[in-house]
Structure formats: structure tokens, C-alpha cells
Image (cartoon, rainbow, N blue to C red):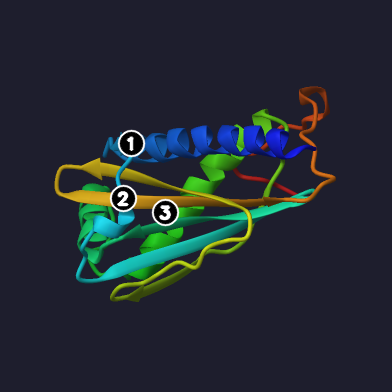
Amino acid sequence: MTSREFGSVFAMMQKHAVTATKDLFAELGMPIRHVQGASRRHRRMSATITAVIGFAAAHARGSLVMCTSDQTIRCWLRSMAGAGRSADACDALGEFSNMLLARLQRYLYAEGMKILLSTPTSACGRHLIVAPTDGASRWFYFQRPGWHLDVRLDAVFDEAFELASSADAEPIASGGDVILF
């Protein structure tokens, strides 16, 4: 693939990352708005929680990063029916990153990109900085009254990367499906 083709694939991934994020929170009864052009550098949070979850595909790899405040995660948990107030915010954000990447996985699969998901890792601290990646990277910003969410998509493509044809696609499980072996 050429660098232009890689750019086209990453643009497709970005579009689906925004849609998957909006879908996730809409399904949870918390619709959010994508804010174009916001800058993460201008955000001030007393404490930040970050979750990172990786993915791999044939000749490609990347990660999805979610950053927000403890207060925001507490709002999410209060909004969800049956969510415990004692839930650990770092663990909760890790679970949200897993749900988000699973939704993105379904969109990418339909485009011919089958990805495998890793286990999320989360961290809590003041002024956390997520290191830059060697490949393509893009931050997205989402808001809802009283809270915000920053999401970053990273991807690295090897020269041999190709999207599969839709004819080669096998069905993929939806979130919540039971798979019997």
C-alpha cells in the first residue's frame, strides 16, 4: 500500500471511531457530542484517568486511548442502571475502553479489517501524558453537559497491509453475544 492508501484507511478508522464512541454512549442513555477542533492542551483537570487498549490485525497494530476525569466516570456510573457506587474508576474506564473498541471492531470488520483486541490498561494521576506513537494518531473530543471525554486512535501499518474483501468476511460476534465452543 502507498502512504496515500494508508491515509485513506486511517481516515476510515477515524470516522468509525467517532461513530462508535457516539453509539456507545447513546446506547447507555448518555448521548454525547463530538467537538471538532478542540485542543487537549487547553483542558485542565485536577486528576486524569486514562485507559489504553491495543489491537492487532494482519500487518497492522494500534491502540485506543480514553482520557477523562474521575468525576466524569462517576457520572457515567450513576447514569447506568445497577452500576455500583463503589466501582473503581480506573477499572470502569478500562471496561468502557473495551466496549468502545468492540464497537469499533464491528465497523472495521465490515470494511475488511479484522482486528483482535487486547486487555485494557488504566492509570490515574495528575497531568498524565500519553506518549506519541510512531504511526498515525488522532485525538477526538466529546462533550455532554457536566463532563467531557478525550479519545485517541493510533495505528501503524506495515507495507504488506491490505483490507480484505467483504466476500472473505466471516460473521463477527456482537457485544453481549454468547459464544459456545
Kindly indicate the quadrant of the structure image that contains residue 3: top right
Question: Is the residue under label 1 in contact with that under label 2 (CB below 8 Å)?
Answer: no
* Quadrant where the image shows the N terminus: top right
Reply above or below: 16 against 39.
above
User: How many marks on residues?
Assistant: 3
* Residue appearing at x 76%, y 34% in the figure: 163
Amino acid at circle 2:
Ser
Disc with the residue nearer the chain's start (2 vs 3)? 2
Reply above or below: 40 against 165.
below
x, y (%) of residue 68? 30, 59
As drawn, which residue projects farthest toward the left? Answer: 146
x, y (%) of residue 171? 72, 32
* Residue appearing at x 64%, y 32% in the figure: 8
Disc with the residue nearer the chain's start (3 vs 1)? 1
User: Nearer the viewer's eye, disc 2 or disc 3?
Assistant: 2
Reply above or below: 86 against 27.
below
**Near-viewer residue (8 or 59):** 8
x, y (%) of residue 157? 72, 49
Mark 3–mark 1 distance (CA, rounded to whole Å): 22 Å
Q: Which residue is mark 2?
A: 39
Kindly indicate the quadrant of the structure image that contains residue 96: bottom left
Q: Secondary structure at mark 1?
A: loop
Q: Residues within 10 Å of mark 2 (few under 14, many from 20)?
A: few
x, y (%) of residue 119? 58, 64
Return the mark for residue 113.
none
Q: Which residue is mark 1?
A: 36
Amino acid at circle 1:
Gln
